[in-house]
Amino acid sequence: MKILAIESSNQTMSAAVCENGRLLAEVTTNGNLQHSTQLMPAVDHVMKLAGWKPADLECIAVAKGPGSYTGVRIGATIAKTLAWTLAIPLVPISSLKVIAGNCEGAAHKLVPMIDARRGNCYTAVYQFEDNLLVERIADTHIASEEWFQRLLAEEGTYLFVGEDVSKYRERIGELFKERALFAGESQALPRASVLATLSESATAEDPHTFVPSYLKKPEAEEKWEQQHLSNRREDYVERVDSSI
């Protein structure tokens, strides 16, 4: 199976091509957030390194979110377009699962974390079972303190992984003490090669109906709704008052 994998759901941008579980080429950058201009050139680059043409591809794997709304949308749009044009399967994988997948072989419960601002995070719990990465707690958008209390109520040791874990590391240490382990920096960034591996045991979706997993609305949309909902309420009160 010849797979093109695309990960652009957060600051990291990664593209890889793999054949039958073997990585042929991968490009990963971090921190510049220029996915709109750099993702397609990265895809083209790894394809050329592998000596492949688009017609050679048999599957497109894409990180479906959560994460940056813009980053997720760019990756999803490119993946859907390629899968539809080439008439090949599209396999979406959770961005959190991709991060957890960096810890292959770990015996502990894996807690990938992506910062969602204002004390919130995108997170989940995964665990390797018979060499497969299994979801224990589904991806969620949640206040970090609420999340930590939920984890504390469960048994076992947690391995926290992801670039944004550093923002919560002190608090995690205070709460979990010896129950908390932290993955190394080399495991923090999501990689398209890991995404490709995970896609081999996942289910394909129709490119026409596939929708990314944002888990929450964009901040701009939330502000717009709050403003207009407030205006509607004020308008309603004014109309009621004027009718009395």
Image: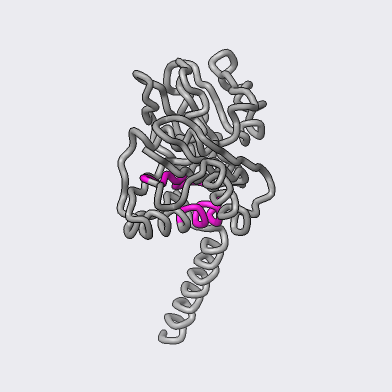
**Residue positioned 60% across, 41% down in the render:** 27
User: Residue 47 versus residue 203: which sits nearer the camera?
Assistant: 47
Quick check: 39 above or below 2?
below
Magenta residues (range):
58-76
- Looking at the image, the residue that sits furthest to the right is 32
**Residue positioned 50% across, 66% down in the render:** 225
Check the picture and name the quadrant holding the C terminus.
bottom left
Percent position (x, y) of residue 148?
A: 52, 29
**Residue positioned 42% across, 21% down in the render:** 154
Quarter residue 80 falls in? bottom left
User: Residue 221 versus residue 55: which sits nearer the camera?
Assistant: 55
- Looking at the image, the residue that sits furthest to the bottom is 243
Q: Is residue 82 left or right of residue 13?
A: left
Quick check: 119 above or below 217?
above
Percent position (x, y) of residue 184?
A: 62, 23
Q: Is residue 89 left or right of residue 61?
A: left
The reply to whether residue 168 is visible in this rendering is yes
Q: In this view, does 22 lie to the left or right of 202?
A: right
Quick check: 42 above or below 183?
below
Query: What number of labels is visible?
Result: 0
Percent position (x, y) of residue 147?
A: 50, 33
The reply to whether residue 147 is visible in this rendering is no
Check the picture and name the quadrant holding the N terminus.
top left
